[in-house]
Every structure is written in C-alpha cells, then in structure tokens.
Image: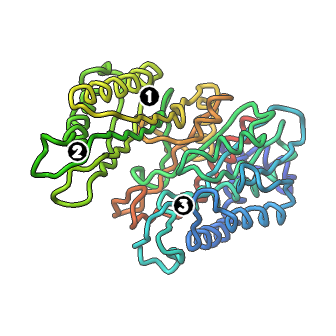
Amino acid sequence: MPSTTQPSPGASLGDRLANNPETRIREATAAIEPRLVELRRDIHAHPELAFEETRTAGIVAAELARLGIAHRTGVGRTGVLGVIEGGRPGPTLAIRADMDALPIHEETGQAFASTNPGKMHACGHDIHTTTLLGVAEVLRGLAPQLAGRVVLVFQPAEEVLEGAAAMIADGAAEGVDFALGFHNHPDMPVGRFGYVRGASLAASDRFDIILRGRSGHAAHPYSAVDPIVAAAHLVAQLQTVVSREMKPLHPAVVTVGMFQGGTTYNIIPERVHLKGTVRTLHTEARDKAEAAIRRLVEGVCTAMRCTAEVDYQRKVPPLVNSDEVLDPAIAAVRAQMGEVVEEGEPSMGAEDFSAFAERVPAFQLRIGAGAPGRDDRLHNAGYQPDERCIGLGVQALSRIALDMLS
C-alpha cells in the first residue's frame, strides 16, 4: 500500500523522497504529462517503419540532450541509448521501449492521425517511446537516490523482430544486470497493470516453402505435376502438427499466412509459395514443430511427385519473465499505484525484448491502455489507446527503477 508518512514543513527533496517516494514520483509525472502527450501525438502523426526511425530517434536524442542525459545515437542502426548514473555504486538496469510503426493505413480520424500514408502506430510504440522519455525525466531528478545506473534503450525494428539483436550487437546489453520492458494492453482498462510468470510471450519462427511441380494445360493434368494440389494437401497436413504432435500442455500455433501460385484459369503452374509462422512457449515444442514441418513437406513431395525448398528461420526465443525482476517490480508498482496489478495468461504473440531476457534476468510489465467504451485491438487501423496510460506507465516504471536501485 502507498506510504502515508507526511513530510515535515520545509523538508528537503531527499527527505521527501525517502519518506514518500510515491508522492514525489506522482508529482513529477503530473508536471510533465502534458508535454509527453504532445510528444506522443507528434510521433504518432509521423510514423516510421523498422530501421527507418530517424525522425523519431532525433526527437528522442533532442529530449535526452535537453535533460542533460548522456546518450548515443545510431545504436542498432537507428536506436538511441541513454545512461543515467546514480548517486552510489550498484547494478545496471536497462529499460527498453520500441519506436517503430506498422505498414497499416490509419483510419482513426484523429487530428493527429498519421501523415505518412500506409504507415501507422497501430501497436502503441509511440506510447512506449514517450513513456520512456517520461521515465528518463523523472529518474534524472531522482538520480542522487539511485544506487547503480539506468540504461534507456530506445529500440528500432521490433515489428520485424530484428531491432533488439541489432542494438545488442552494438553493445546495448554490455554491463547490464537486469532488464525491464513494458507494453500497452488495450484488453486491460487504463489504470490496471499485469504480469505473467515464466514464459509470457512465444518464440516466433517463420517458414517459406516452395513446392515445384511441372506446368501444363489445365485440361490435361495427367501430363503435369500439380503443385497447387500438393500445397493444398500440405496446408491440411500442417494442421496436425499442433493437434497430433504437441503435448496439450505445450501451447503451439502453426499458421500459413500466404498461399501463392498460378496465373490464370487454365494453366497448372510450375511452383507454389507458402509463407507461415510457428509460435511456441517451450523449447521442446519449438524443436518438434520444425522437425514435423520438414517431415510433412518431404512426405507430400514423395506422394505428389513434387520437389521442395524449405527456408525455416528461427527469429526470437520465448520471452521468459524472471522472478528475480518480476517480484520486486510488482511490489514496486503496488507501492506506487495500489492494488491495481493482476496476473495474466501467456500470449502466443512474440516480442524481441526476449533477446535481452535471454541474456539477463528480465521482466515485461503489461500496462492497461483500454479506453472506456471502446473495444480496441493492437495492429488495427482504428487503434486508439487511452493516453492516460503514458503517465501511469511513467509512475510505475520509475518506481520500479527506484526500488530496484535503492
């Protein structure tokens, strides 16, 4: 529960912080929240896709410079890395926000809607970027009370699951002891927070399968080898990977997202191209899914007289939350915000913050962003998160950092 200790008249900032940190963080956040909303709307109006976030990175760098926070740009191509040194020695906590938008044409009708046709912040990364800027400002004011340092990770290219690896390759995880991530959740009302113990998001793998037959006239299929029929059999067979090969307690998803082949009515084509994704929460299921897909392709080719090329790419591992970070983080959120935290279920969505979690103990906080009376969804052309989640996220994340580095 929040502290009820009242500071004495004329108490110093350090005394107020020591006696009532939730008030200090709440007041500091309230002072900057209007500016954060303005920044969010500006970023929202100018969305940039993966590894194109030069304008967004420029805004981030300018804000960090204004705050006197040491930083460097061009990390992982278009990422920004800031550092806040605490007043005493201690561990290093990285806090990560992603910056990229999606190739979606916005249909919200908002005055600050995207000015870049076919591009939109439909996953709330504009919310994430401005939230971390707010955390940066609050923690800069609290820096003398921190035992350790905070690394601010403004990451590109989360939507293509490549930005975290790119930043890590440029040193973003060097010297980091713990990592903290966060994501807005429209399925949770604004003002609520959530967590999942253990694996919270899935490993994401993808496959390209090209089936090759022999083209011919549609009226004489016996003289051809039809890859469309073979591909149709394969799509049906792939549905058995989960239903007949996975343990029921090991969640998995195999989805074919593209089936492309042929040009017109009366020609059997030479090739068919399938694209799909595989999501798993357990290493055993991940290995089994890949082996099963390769085996089924081989079997269909044998049965249907085709040949095949399989390009199977393992993108990111599952995001596994560590109790070492989760427990103090949730305690800090409750201390700052009250009893507004609930345990949730894993999702088969994926997140390349898992690249940090694979290296150091890490936790991703869920921040409620659902607006009253709306039924919003991520990756939707009409998505509009409740902007109050920015300030609430700033408070929660700032308190986590303060308590973990106290």
Assign a secondary structure to mark 1.
Answer: loop
Q: From what the image shows, is residue 94 above or below residue 325?
A: below
Image point (90%, 37%), residue name: 88
Residue 333 visible in the displayed image: yes
Camera-side mark, 2 or 3? 2
Give the class, few, some or many, for how many residues have Cα within 10 Å of label 1's Cα (few <14, many ≥20). Answer: many
**Residue 282 percent location from the top left of the image:** 45, 23
Instruction: Work out how far the residue at label 1 is from the one at label 3, CA to CA, in angstroms.
Output: 26 Å
| Mark linked to residue 281 | 1
Give the mark nearer the N terminus: 2 vs 1.
Answer: 2
Relative to 195, 178 lies left or right: right
Rendered residue at 77%/50% (across/down) = 81
Which one is nearer the viewer's eye here, 129 or 365?
129
Q: Nearer the viewer, mark 2 or mark 1?
A: 2
Residue, disc 3: 101
User: Of marks 2 and 3, which one's residue comes earlier in the chain?
Assistant: 3
Residue 388 in which image quadrant: bottom right
